[in-house]
Amino acid sequence: MSAPERLSPFGPEAKPGRHGAAGGTPVSITERRVDIVQVTAGREAEAPFADIVKDATGLSLPPAHQAAFSGEAMVVWVQPSGWLMIKPRGDEGALAKALAGVAGDAVAVVDQSHGKAVLRLSGARARDVLAKGCRVDLHPRAFLTGSAATTTVDHITITVVQVDAIPTYDLILPANFAEAFLEWLLMSAAEFGCEVRPPT
Amino acid sequence: MHRIDCPWCGVRDEAEFGYRGDATVRRPAADGDADAFYAFVYDRTNPKGWHVEWWQHVAGCRQWLKVVRHTVTHEIRTVAKAGDDVRAPSP
């Protein structure tokens, strides 16, 4: 018997369609269905683990406040010696298992695929939408493609990653606050108009 | 609102941090007597002036930080990593 299909943590609000003001330059919001694994390396384990990740994914572990990308895969710095590894959804637990298999005992590997959710916010006004609730300076002089920061938006702790210069942001948030956060995001985006796209 | 210069994340709003108490208190040795442990848990100097405090960047990098803060003016003079040796300036 196969496992039941996983429900979206974003709830009914995530139904694809147009929200807010008509016309203008709408932003787009897309749920990214991904596997997320948090890895935390012991101090001496960081250098060998960086080599392992490089071999396995071709990605270098990014330095503080940075994310590294390779196609649809992403590694995000979240704390000293701590990263989130993100890949398109595969077999249940496979990414964590693969990492745990090569990481060694001094690296903690925790599967967060059910614990966290990812929204992609994109569009010319995406910065304005996010800035209404974000305490981190998102101006291009301070926050660029590849920048990552963990902060609070609407009292919810989220990690903001800038993916490109449109700008596009990936917002990594606790899955149990996903619906509440999406409500805030739709309200914030209402003045520009907003297109909720089918999950990818 | 304090602005705390996290050594890992840069200047952030106080709302991202949690206050975690007096950073000058030292845990007694495991064979310490009851009075020593009572003092460790309850006795605080509560200074009017410079104070070395634990703050945790809860909604950020989650690291514990040592913050030197003036309890009257709220001026923050130093924000250091947990392992750093930080002393309060003389009043």
Image: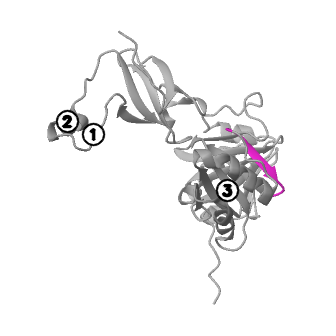
Residue that label 3 marks: A118
Report in which chain the residue with disc 3 lies. A
Residue that label 1 marks: B29
Quarter occupied by residue A125: top right
B4 vs A19: above or below: above
What's under tag 3, amino acid-wise?
Val
Q: Residue A131: image x %, image y %?
A: 66, 36
Q: Residue A7: image x %, image y %?
A: 62, 71
| Residue displayed at 62% across by 62% down | A10
Residue A171 appears in the figure:
yes
Q: Both on one chain, marks 2 and 3?
A: no
Q: Is residue A65 magenta?
A: yes
Q: Residue furthest top?
A: B91
Classify mark 1: helix, strand or loop. Answer: loop
Residue A82 appears in the figure:
no
Residue that label 2 marks: B36
Is residue A176 or residue A14 the one in the foreground?
Answer: A176
Give the class, few, some or many, for how many residues have Cα within 10 Å of label 1's Cα (few <14, many ≥20): few
Report in which chain the residue with disc 2 lies. B
The answer to whether B44 appears left or right of B14 in the picture is left
Contact between marks 2 and 3 (CB within 8 A): the answer is no
Q: From the viewer's perspective, is the residue at label 1 or at label 3 nearer?
A: 1
Classify mark 3: helix, strand or loop. Answer: strand
Q: From the viewer's perspective, is the residue at label 2 or at label 1 nearer?
A: 1
Quadrant of the drawing holding the N terminus of chain A: bottom right
